[in-house]
Image (cartoon, rainbow, N blue to C red):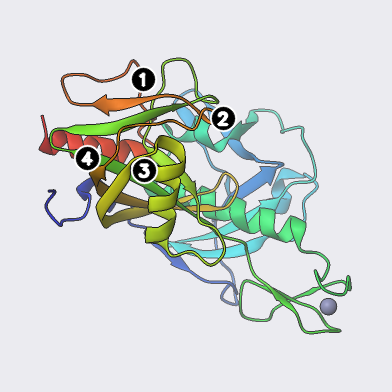
Amino acid sequence: MEEEEPVTNCEALDRQLEPAVVPPSGALGSCLYFAFSEDRLLVYADPKGYLLPRLESFGELDLLFRDPHYLGQLDDVHCFAVDLQTATPPQGMALMGLRELYADFSEGIFQLAGRAFQVVNWDRTHHFCGRCGQNADYHESDRARRCPDCGLLSFPRVSPAVITLIHKGDEFLLARNARFPEGRYSIIAGFVEAGETLEEAVAREIYEEVGVEVSDITYRCSQSWPFPHSLMVGFTAAWAGRDIRIDEDEIVDAGWFSARHLPPSLPDGISISRRLIDSFLAKHP
Ligand SMILES: [Zn+2]
Protein backbone atom coordinates (compact mmCIF):
# COMPACT_ATOMS: atom_id res chain seq x y z
CA MET A 1 0.00 0.00 0.00
CA GLU A 2 1.44 3.37 -1.01
CA GLU A 3 1.47 6.46 1.15
CA GLU A 4 -1.30 8.93 0.30
CA GLU A 5 0.96 11.73 -0.85
CA PRO A 6 1.01 13.48 -4.22
CA VAL A 7 3.76 12.67 -6.70
CA THR A 8 6.33 15.26 -5.69
CA ASN A 9 7.96 15.97 -9.04
CA CYS A 10 4.61 17.02 -10.44
CA GLU A 11 5.15 20.21 -8.44
CA ALA A 12 7.45 21.19 -11.28
CA LEU A 13 4.33 21.57 -13.40
CA ASP A 14 3.17 24.60 -11.41
CA ARG A 15 2.55 27.44 -13.79
CA GLN A 16 3.70 30.99 -13.49
CA LEU A 17 1.13 32.33 -15.97
CA GLU A 18 -1.55 34.78 -14.93
CA PRO A 19 -4.08 33.75 -17.59
CA ALA A 20 -6.39 36.22 -19.30
CA VAL A 21 -8.37 36.42 -22.53
CA VAL A 22 -8.50 40.18 -23.11
CA PRO A 23 -5.15 42.07 -23.14
CA PRO A 24 -4.87 45.18 -20.96
CA SER A 25 -5.24 48.47 -22.83
CA GLY A 26 -2.20 50.59 -23.63
CA ALA A 27 1.31 49.68 -24.71
CA LEU A 28 2.29 46.13 -23.74
CA GLY A 29 6.01 46.45 -24.44
CA SER A 30 7.95 43.51 -25.75
CA CYS A 31 5.69 40.42 -25.88
CA LEU A 32 6.33 36.69 -26.16
CA TYR A 33 4.78 35.05 -29.24
CA PHE A 34 3.89 31.37 -29.57
CA ALA A 35 3.27 31.14 -33.32
CA PHE A 36 2.23 27.83 -34.88
CA SER A 37 2.31 26.65 -38.47
CA GLU A 38 0.19 23.47 -38.35
CA ASP A 39 1.53 21.93 -35.09
CA ARG A 40 5.05 23.40 -35.30
CA LEU A 41 6.25 26.37 -33.24
CA LEU A 42 8.24 29.29 -34.65
CA VAL A 43 11.57 29.78 -32.81
CA TYR A 44 14.92 31.44 -33.34
CA ALA A 45 17.52 28.75 -34.08
CA ASP A 46 20.24 30.18 -31.84
CA PRO A 47 23.47 28.17 -31.41
CA LYS A 48 22.77 28.14 -27.62
CA GLY A 49 19.32 26.66 -28.15
CA TYR A 50 15.89 27.50 -29.51
CA LEU A 51 14.38 30.80 -28.37
CA LEU A 52 10.87 32.20 -28.68
CA PRO A 53 10.36 35.48 -30.55
CA ARG A 54 9.97 38.46 -28.21
CA LEU A 55 8.70 41.49 -30.13
CA GLU A 56 6.77 44.75 -29.76
CA SER A 57 4.46 43.49 -32.51
CA PHE A 58 4.31 40.16 -34.33
CA GLY A 59 3.95 42.12 -37.59
CA GLU A 60 7.69 42.94 -37.34
CA LEU A 61 8.44 39.44 -38.69
CA ASP A 62 6.60 40.21 -41.93
CA LEU A 63 4.79 36.84 -42.01
CA LEU A 64 1.16 36.05 -42.84
CA PHE A 65 -0.82 35.30 -39.67
CA ARG A 66 -4.32 35.41 -38.22
CA ASP A 67 -5.37 37.55 -35.21
CA PRO A 68 -3.20 36.80 -32.15
CA HIS A 69 -4.94 35.41 -29.05
CA TYR A 70 -3.91 36.89 -25.72
CA LEU A 71 -2.83 34.23 -23.18
CA GLY A 72 -1.96 36.36 -20.15
CA GLN A 73 1.16 37.47 -18.35
CA LEU A 74 4.20 35.35 -17.58
CA ASP A 75 6.08 37.30 -14.89
CA ASP A 76 6.10 40.79 -16.50
CA VAL A 77 5.77 39.63 -20.10
CA HIS A 78 2.51 39.55 -22.07
CA CYS A 79 2.06 36.39 -24.13
CA PHE A 80 0.17 35.67 -27.33
CA ALA A 81 -0.71 32.63 -29.43
CA VAL A 82 -0.59 33.13 -33.20
CA ASP A 83 -1.84 31.02 -36.11
CA LEU A 84 0.78 31.33 -38.87
CA GLN A 85 -0.41 31.20 -42.45
CA THR A 86 2.96 30.12 -43.81
CA ALA A 87 5.10 26.98 -43.58
CA THR A 88 8.35 28.81 -44.43
CA PRO A 89 10.20 30.34 -41.45
CA PRO A 90 12.24 33.54 -41.95
CA GLN A 91 16.06 33.46 -42.10
CA GLY A 92 17.53 32.39 -38.74
CA MET A 93 14.25 30.91 -37.50
CA ALA A 94 12.82 27.37 -37.54
CA LEU A 95 9.49 25.58 -37.14
CA MET A 96 9.81 22.83 -34.52
CA GLY A 97 7.53 20.17 -33.04
CA LEU A 98 6.77 20.84 -29.36
CA ARG A 99 8.33 17.59 -28.15
CA GLU A 100 11.63 18.52 -29.85
CA LEU A 101 11.72 21.73 -27.79
CA TYR A 102 11.26 20.15 -24.37
CA ALA A 103 14.99 20.18 -23.55
CA ASP A 104 15.37 23.86 -24.54
CA PHE A 105 12.36 25.24 -22.67
CA SER A 106 11.66 25.58 -18.96
CA GLU A 107 8.69 23.58 -17.64
CA GLY A 108 6.60 26.78 -17.44
CA ILE A 109 7.37 27.83 -21.02
CA PHE A 110 6.74 24.32 -22.33
CA GLN A 111 3.34 24.23 -20.59
CA LEU A 112 2.51 27.66 -21.98
CA ALA A 113 3.47 26.56 -25.50
CA GLY A 114 1.06 23.63 -25.07
CA ARG A 115 -1.68 26.01 -23.94
CA ALA A 116 -0.99 28.30 -26.92
CA PHE A 117 -1.21 25.38 -29.33
CA GLN A 118 -4.56 24.29 -27.92
CA VAL A 119 -5.95 27.83 -28.27
CA VAL A 120 -4.76 28.08 -31.90
CA ASN A 121 -6.05 24.61 -32.69
CA TRP A 122 -9.45 25.42 -31.16
CA ASP A 123 -9.68 28.64 -33.17
CA ARG A 124 -8.86 26.83 -36.43
CA THR A 125 -11.67 24.30 -35.93
CA HIS A 126 -14.49 26.51 -34.60
CA HIS A 127 -15.02 29.21 -37.24
CA PHE A 128 -18.56 27.95 -37.80
CA CYS A 129 -21.37 27.07 -35.42
CA GLY A 130 -21.53 23.29 -34.93
CA ARG A 131 -25.34 23.40 -34.73
CA CYS A 132 -26.47 25.76 -37.53
CA GLY A 133 -23.30 26.43 -39.58
CA GLN A 134 -23.36 30.25 -39.14
CA ASN A 135 -20.05 32.16 -38.80
CA ALA A 136 -19.33 32.20 -35.05
CA ASP A 137 -18.17 35.39 -33.25
CA TYR A 138 -15.60 35.61 -30.46
CA HIS A 139 -17.08 35.89 -26.97
CA GLU A 140 -16.26 39.32 -25.49
CA SER A 141 -14.68 38.04 -22.25
CA ASP A 142 -14.31 34.23 -22.32
CA ARG A 143 -12.16 31.93 -24.45
CA ALA A 144 -15.17 30.91 -26.52
CA ARG A 145 -17.03 31.54 -29.75
CA ARG A 146 -20.75 32.29 -29.84
CA CYS A 147 -23.13 31.77 -32.73
CA PRO A 148 -24.96 35.06 -33.49
CA ASP A 149 -28.01 33.11 -34.77
CA CYS A 150 -28.62 30.26 -32.32
CA GLY A 151 -26.36 31.29 -29.40
CA LEU A 152 -24.35 28.04 -29.25
CA LEU A 153 -21.11 28.52 -27.27
CA SER A 154 -17.97 26.62 -28.32
CA PHE A 155 -15.05 26.33 -25.91
CA PRO A 156 -11.59 24.83 -26.48
CA ARG A 157 -11.94 21.05 -26.33
CA VAL A 158 -10.24 19.15 -23.50
CA SER A 159 -10.24 15.33 -23.64
CA PRO A 160 -9.55 13.66 -20.28
CA ALA A 161 -7.47 10.50 -20.28
CA VAL A 162 -6.49 8.39 -17.28
CA ILE A 163 -3.03 6.90 -16.77
CA THR A 164 -2.36 4.45 -13.95
CA LEU A 165 0.63 2.83 -12.29
CA ILE A 166 -0.53 -0.56 -10.92
CA HIS A 167 1.59 -1.77 -8.01
CA LYS A 168 2.01 -5.18 -6.37
CA GLY A 169 4.54 -4.98 -3.52
CA ASP A 170 7.88 -3.86 -4.99
CA GLU A 171 6.68 -4.54 -8.54
CA PHE A 172 4.63 -2.50 -10.96
CA LEU A 173 2.93 -3.32 -14.24
CA LEU A 174 4.31 -2.16 -17.60
CA ALA A 175 2.89 -2.91 -21.03
CA ARG A 176 4.23 -2.56 -24.53
CA ASN A 177 1.81 -1.04 -27.04
CA ALA A 178 2.17 -2.13 -30.67
CA ARG A 179 2.68 1.54 -31.64
CA PHE A 180 5.57 2.21 -29.20
CA PRO A 181 9.21 2.58 -30.33
CA GLU A 182 11.36 -0.58 -30.11
CA GLY A 183 11.88 -1.77 -26.49
CA ARG A 184 9.59 0.88 -24.95
CA TYR A 185 7.21 -0.05 -22.11
CA SER A 186 4.81 2.19 -20.20
CA ILE A 187 1.93 2.18 -17.73
CA ILE A 188 -1.73 1.80 -18.75
CA ALA A 189 -3.54 4.78 -20.30
CA GLY A 190 -6.79 5.45 -22.12
CA PHE A 191 -9.46 8.05 -22.79
CA VAL A 192 -12.41 8.57 -20.48
CA GLU A 193 -15.70 7.66 -22.15
CA ALA A 194 -18.88 9.73 -21.99
CA GLY A 195 -20.77 9.02 -18.75
CA GLU A 196 -17.80 7.48 -16.92
CA THR A 197 -16.13 8.61 -13.70
CA LEU A 198 -12.32 8.78 -13.73
CA GLU A 199 -12.14 5.76 -11.40
CA GLU A 200 -14.44 3.74 -13.67
CA ALA A 201 -12.24 4.63 -16.64
CA VAL A 202 -9.11 3.49 -14.73
CA ALA A 203 -10.64 0.10 -13.84
CA ARG A 204 -12.12 -0.44 -17.33
CA GLU A 205 -8.95 0.46 -19.28
CA ILE A 206 -6.80 -1.77 -17.06
CA TYR A 207 -9.19 -4.71 -17.32
CA GLU A 208 -9.51 -4.30 -21.13
CA GLU A 209 -5.80 -3.94 -21.82
CA VAL A 210 -4.13 -6.29 -19.31
CA GLY A 211 -7.00 -8.22 -17.68
CA VAL A 212 -6.14 -7.53 -14.03
CA GLU A 213 -8.39 -6.16 -11.28
CA VAL A 214 -7.35 -3.21 -9.12
CA SER A 215 -8.30 -1.52 -5.86
CA ASP A 216 -7.20 1.63 -3.97
CA ILE A 217 -7.40 3.81 -7.10
CA THR A 218 -5.68 7.00 -5.90
CA TYR A 219 -5.30 10.32 -7.74
CA ARG A 220 -1.67 11.53 -7.95
CA CYS A 221 -1.28 14.41 -10.40
CA SER A 222 -2.34 15.69 -13.80
CA GLN A 223 -0.75 17.15 -16.89
CA SER A 224 -2.09 19.04 -19.85
CA TRP A 225 -0.96 17.07 -22.91
CA PRO A 226 -1.38 19.21 -26.02
CA PHE A 227 -1.17 16.40 -28.61
CA PRO A 228 -3.70 17.68 -29.52
CA HIS A 229 -5.93 18.44 -26.49
CA SER A 230 -5.70 15.81 -23.75
CA LEU A 231 -5.72 16.23 -20.01
CA MET A 232 -3.77 13.32 -18.54
CA VAL A 233 -5.01 12.39 -15.05
CA GLY A 234 -2.48 10.25 -13.18
CA PHE A 235 -3.41 7.53 -10.66
CA THR A 236 -1.87 4.66 -8.77
CA ALA A 237 -3.83 1.48 -8.03
CA ALA A 238 -3.11 -1.75 -6.16
CA TRP A 239 -3.28 -5.11 -7.95
CA ALA A 240 -6.33 -6.89 -6.53
CA GLY A 241 -6.61 -10.09 -8.56
CA ARG A 242 -6.32 -12.06 -11.83
CA ASP A 243 -3.23 -12.81 -13.92
CA ILE A 244 -2.14 -10.61 -16.81
CA ARG A 245 -4.12 -11.32 -20.00
CA ILE A 246 -3.28 -8.83 -22.76
CA ASP A 247 -5.60 -7.33 -25.35
CA GLU A 248 -3.70 -8.53 -28.41
CA ASP A 249 -5.16 -5.83 -30.68
CA GLU A 250 -3.34 -3.09 -28.75
CA ILE A 251 -0.74 -4.65 -26.46
CA VAL A 252 2.12 -6.91 -27.55
CA ASP A 253 3.56 -7.67 -24.09
CA ALA A 254 2.97 -6.83 -20.42
CA GLY A 255 4.57 -7.90 -17.17
CA TRP A 256 5.57 -7.03 -13.62
CA PHE A 257 8.75 -4.96 -13.32
CA SER A 258 10.83 -3.54 -10.47
CA ALA A 259 13.86 -1.29 -9.85
CA ARG A 260 16.09 -4.37 -10.34
CA HIS A 261 14.27 -5.49 -13.49
CA LEU A 262 13.36 -2.72 -15.92
CA PRO A 263 12.62 -2.84 -19.68
CA PRO A 264 15.13 -1.45 -22.27
CA SER A 265 13.21 1.82 -22.62
CA LEU A 266 10.79 3.87 -20.50
CA PRO A 267 8.72 6.95 -21.53
CA ASP A 268 10.47 10.35 -21.82
CA GLY A 269 10.86 12.55 -18.74
CA ILE A 270 8.41 15.01 -20.29
CA SER A 271 5.50 12.65 -19.67
CA ILE A 272 3.34 12.03 -16.61
CA SER A 273 3.87 8.27 -17.10
CA ARG A 274 7.60 8.70 -16.45
CA ARG A 275 6.89 10.88 -13.42
CA LEU A 276 4.63 8.23 -11.93
CA ILE A 277 7.22 5.50 -12.65
CA ASP A 278 10.11 7.55 -11.19
CA SER A 279 8.06 8.31 -8.09
CA PHE A 280 7.33 4.59 -7.55
CA LEU A 281 10.99 3.62 -8.11
CA ALA A 282 12.15 6.29 -5.62
CA LYS A 283 10.00 4.63 -2.95
CA HIS A 284 10.89 1.05 -4.01
CA PRO A 285 14.62 1.18 -4.87
ZN1 LIG B 1 -25.71 28.43 -34.54
Disc 1 from disc 3: Cα separation: 15 Å
Q: Which residue is mark 2?
A: 249
Q: Residue at x 40, y 39 (%)?
A: 188
x, y (%) of residue 159? 55, 57
Residue nearest the viewer, comparing 124 with 59: 124
Q: CA distance from mark 3 to mark 4?
A: 16 Å
- Tag 4, which secondary structure? strand
Q: Which residue is mark 1?
A: 265
In the foreground, 44 or 181:
181
Q: CA distance from mark 1 to mark 2?
A: 21 Å
Can residue 18 be seen? yes
Q: Secondary structure at mark 2?
A: loop
Q: Residue 166, which numbered label?
A: none
Res. 56 in view = no
Q: Is residue 56 left or right of residue 257?
A: right
Q: Secondary structure at mark 3?
A: helix
**In the picture, residue 69 is in which quadrant?**
bottom right
Eye-nearest disc, 3 or 2 = 2
Q: Is mark 4 within 8 Å of ligand 1?
A: no
Q: Which mark is residue 272?
A: 3
Amino acid type of the residue tagged 4 in the rendering = His
Amino acid at the residue labelled 3: Ile
